[in-house]
Amino acid sequence: MNQAVQPHGFDRVPVIIKFQEPAGMVESYGFAGSQGYTFLEGQRLVPRNVDSSVVYVFMHPASTLQLMPMPIALAEAGMHVLCAASRYAKNDSALIMEKVAFDLGAYIRHAREDLGYEKVILVGWSGGGALSLFYQAQAESPTITHTPAGDPYDLTQAGLIPADGLIFVAAHLSRPETLTEWMDPSVLDEIDPDRRDPELDIYDPACPNQPPYSANFIARFRQAQLARNRRISDWAIAMLDRLKNGGSESERCFIVHRTMCDVRWLDPSIDPNGRRPNWCYLGDPRVVNSGPVGLARFTTLRSWLSQWSYDHSNIKAAPNAARVRLTPVLQIENGADDAVPATHNRQVFQALATADKELVRIEGATHYYLGQPDQLQQCLATVIQWSRQHSLV
């Protein structure tokens, strides 16, 4: 085990960014968007009596990360950290991923031009990994001028500043790809989720297919999951066209039922790692499957297409990884991750176009390092050592 770093005291400093941009509608809740301004609320973790020209920027599309173990551990190790919350913090029901990338760019510009940091290391934890890939791809070679719903949003003119290094910790492929692998394929009717295919309803004790699952059943299960995602996407596109061609409505909200259903949770022989069987990072997957905090539970037509649609979202990992050519990348795979499948890290690693890439596996580590100080210290030491090797600290 790596020797633990003696902790520094640090201060939590608010970071507030304010800007205006043209908007067809307001998706963010409350004062921040309705007054014509977008407000971003971040938090900087600044070690006491430690100056630095380098800052680690953590961002997730919808979560706030200033209480997560890794940002705190870095600050205690004497590193400057910026935890950046998007305009959709803690409410992703109407999230537009292209706008989240713009928000991340605003933080990186603020870190360089206003806070005076010379180098920015972008750290993507969980869903922040795909966001970091998306951002860096658009910063290195911008292409996007519209959202998947067809609304104008021009990242080619956003002046996104590339990060100097990318680090992924317990990062999955992307929101649309992960959601698709977790959608309950037994659902036959989106309006009435009690109408289900009993042969695909793996949480029903009466399901004729039981673990360990056959290869044929797994293939059928995956195909049905993808088909369900595509049915919702087709409906969303048709409904948007209908709203655009008449009536007073410009958006429609809806519920996506049962979105924590993966054969991996019940059969640990599928994409094996050290995860706990019959469990996921949110608890019992049978409960989470229909609970209020499941992925994509509450969403809108535009948000579905931007962050959850398998075929339409711009956030998918492989296409963005293939366009990251200029930046060193460190990937940290948690060996007992109860959220991110073991296969996801390798798919990203293989797709990355940069020649300067490294994949490190931390044995026994779960998604959040809960009660795992040794694994957290190993992650911290890996990040600092890699940063020094690349002259980033």
Image (spheres, rainbow, N blue to C red):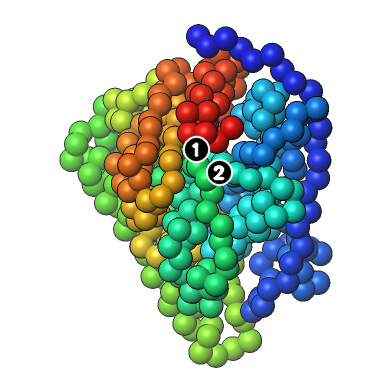
Secondary structure beneath dot 2 equals: strand
User: Residue 250 or 49: which is nearer the viewer?
Assistant: 49
Badge 1, how many Cα within 10 Å: few under 14, some, many 20+?
many
Q: Amino acid at mark 2?
A: Leu
Label 2 near label 1: C-beta < 8 Å?
A: yes
Q: Amino acid at mark 1?
A: Ile
Secondary structure beneath dot 1 equals: strand
Residue 164 located left or right of residue 265: right
Disc on the earlier residue, 1 or 2: 2
Q: CA distance from mark 1 to mark 2?
A: 6 Å
For the C terminus, give its image quadrant.
top right
Q: Check residue 112 in the rendering and tell me which mark sits there, or answer none.
A: none
* Quadrant in the picture for residue 328: top left
User: Residue 162 or 205: which is nearer the viewer?
Assistant: 162
Outermost left residue: 216
Is residue 359 among what the camera can see?
Answer: yes
Q: Which residue is mark 2?
A: 122
Tell me what residue is drawn at x 38 percent, y 70 percent: 234
Tell me what residue is drawn at x 66 percent, y 76 percent: 23
Q: Check residue 167 in the rendering and tell me which mark sits there, or answer none.
A: 1
Tell me what residue is drawn at x 49 percent, y 83 percent: 242
The image position of residue 155, as x and y in percent, is 53, 68
Above/below status of 140 relative to 153? above
The image position of residue 150, as x and y in percent, is 48, 77
